[in-house]
Each structure stands twice: as C-alpha cells, then as structure tokens.
C-alpha cells in the first residue's frame, strides 16, 4: 500500500490530539492528495456525502514487533486489554480508522482538489491510505455498546481561560482549543495538580494545569518562543 494523501491539522505532535474522531467537531483540517491521485474524477459524487471514513497510518507509532495486550490510557495505563479490543496505535499493522465530517471540497487549487473536514483526530502530515463515504443506514448503530470505553465518555474537564490570555487565541481557533482541553489531553496516569503541561496547537504553545476537574490555561506562547 502507498499513501494517497496527507492531512494538514493543527497538531504538529501527538500530545493533545483527541482520542477519538468526532469528539471535537470544531477542529478543522484539510486533506491534500499526492500528485498521482490529484484527479477530480476520483472524487466524483463524494460531495453528496456529509461524512467520510479515513483509513490512515499511525506513522509516529510504528514498531517492529507487537504484543497481544496493551494499556489503554483511559483505564489509567495499568490495566491490560487485548489489542483488538482497543484503538491503540501499537498494532500488528499500524492502521487507524476515523469518521469525519466532510465540510466542503475545494476543487480547483494548485494542489488539486482539497477536502476540508472537521472532527479529525490525526497529527499534521499523517499519511492517508483510503477514503470511503460514510453511509448512515449501514454504518450507524445507535444501540451499540462501547465496552470499557463507555466508562469515561462523559468525563470532561471545566476549562478556565483567564481574560488576559483569551485575546491571544485567534477567534477561529478558540472553540476547537476549548474542546481539546475539555477532553483532557493528559495521559490518564498523570494527576499532579502542580505540574504544568504544554503542547503545540496551530502556531501556539498552550500551557495548563489541572486540579480535580478544573483545567486552567496558565500561559500561551507563540510557537518556538
């Protein structure tokens, strides 16, 4: 297999990326095809669908071997579960699957047709191997159960953004950033209220602390400052 495209997102590193697609609908990304696949005919009809599936590679988590069990972050990093019962990036084949909203298709650009999407959980530059339309009557299962993943689906943090920092965040990024922080980007086994965490988001460096269920943004820097 070879990549057909790459994604451009606001996450230059893995830290902060939502653990599932669709959790932060305000996150905007774009998909740019490699030259070999920049043909509009390959996308004919895709504009009729509201959502698409992305099949992609955990390009920053490739290992030479594999283990049958992994430690899901949402279980504290200490409980082992079968790799095929998780969405861990450490798999026999490092493939990811994400359902995202297709906002629009920009047909005529110097890079060919570009897909504009929202709700993605991919790092900037991630290679994409396939794109398929999301079909509601076949792909949606409202009565499905989520196993141990359901235990933490409502565990969101309250984000406190001091007024003097709010002006440093571009308005078009504010909702997405709050959504990322609400979903607690920390590793589940880290719970030190004195620790200051940081991660790059778009062109910013976001620093924060968490005390109980309250996340406070402590500093916002321009990247590389």
Image: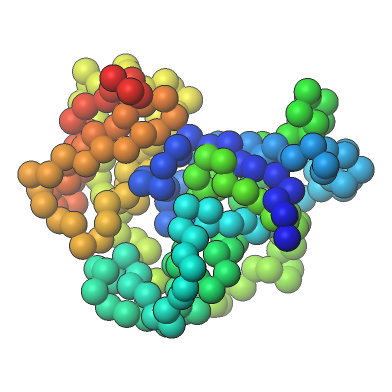
Query: Compared with residue 163, is residue 99 higher up or lower down, i.e. above or below?
Result: below
Here the colouring is rainbow
Asked whether, in this view, residue 75 is left or right of residue 89, the answer is: left
Total count of labels: 0
List the single residue furthest toward the left: 194
Q: Is residue 114 above or below residue 179?
A: above
Q: Is residue 38 left or right of residue 91?
A: right
The spot of residue 152 in percent (x, y) is 33, 66
- Relative placement, left or right, of 105 versus 40 is left
- Can you say whether 46 is above or below 108 in the image? below
Residue 157 position in % (x across, y down)? 26, 49
Q: Is residue 207 visible?
A: yes
Q: Where is residue 180 in the image (x, y as percent from the top left)?
A: 38, 44
Q: Residue furthest right?
A: 41
Q: In which quarter of the image is the C terminus?
A: top left
- Residue at screen point 75% across, 40% down: 34
Q: Residue placed at 30% from the left, 59% from the top?
A: 155
Q: Which of 144 and 41 is in front in this view?
A: 41
26 or 73, nearer to the observer = 73
Q: Is residue 48 visible?
A: no
Residue lying at 72% horizontally and 54% vertically, measured from the top left: 2
Quarter holding the N terminus is bottom right
- Residue drawn 27% across and 78% down? 79
């Amino acid at each position: 297999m070879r990549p057909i495209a790459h994604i451009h997102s606001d996450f230059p590193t893995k830290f902060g990326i939502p653990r599932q697609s669709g959790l932060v609908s305000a996150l905007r990304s774009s998909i740019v095809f490699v030259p070999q696949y920049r043909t509009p005919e390959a996308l004919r009809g895709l504009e009729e669908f509201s959502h698409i599936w992305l099949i992609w590679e955990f390009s920053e988590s490739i290992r030479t071997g594999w283990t049958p069990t992994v430690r899901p972050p949402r279980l504290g990093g200490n409980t082992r579960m079968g790799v095929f019962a998780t969405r861990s990036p450490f798999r026999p084949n490092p493939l990811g699957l994400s359902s995202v909203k297709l906002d629009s298709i920009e047909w005529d650009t110097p890079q060919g047709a570009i897909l504009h999407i929202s709700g993605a959980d991919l790092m900037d530059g991630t290679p994409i191997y396939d794109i398929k339309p999301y079909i509601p009557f076949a792909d949606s299962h409202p009565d499905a159960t989520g196993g141990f993943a359901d235990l933490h689906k409502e565990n969101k943090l309250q984000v406190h953004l001091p007024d003097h920092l709010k002006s440093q965040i571009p308005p078009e990024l504010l909702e997405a950033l709050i959504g990322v922080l609400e979903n607690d980007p920390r590793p589940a086994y880290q719970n030190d209220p004195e620790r200051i965490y940081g991660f790059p988001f778009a062109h910013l460096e976001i620093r924060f602390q968490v005390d109980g269920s309250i996340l406070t943004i402590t500093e916002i820097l321009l990247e590389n400052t």
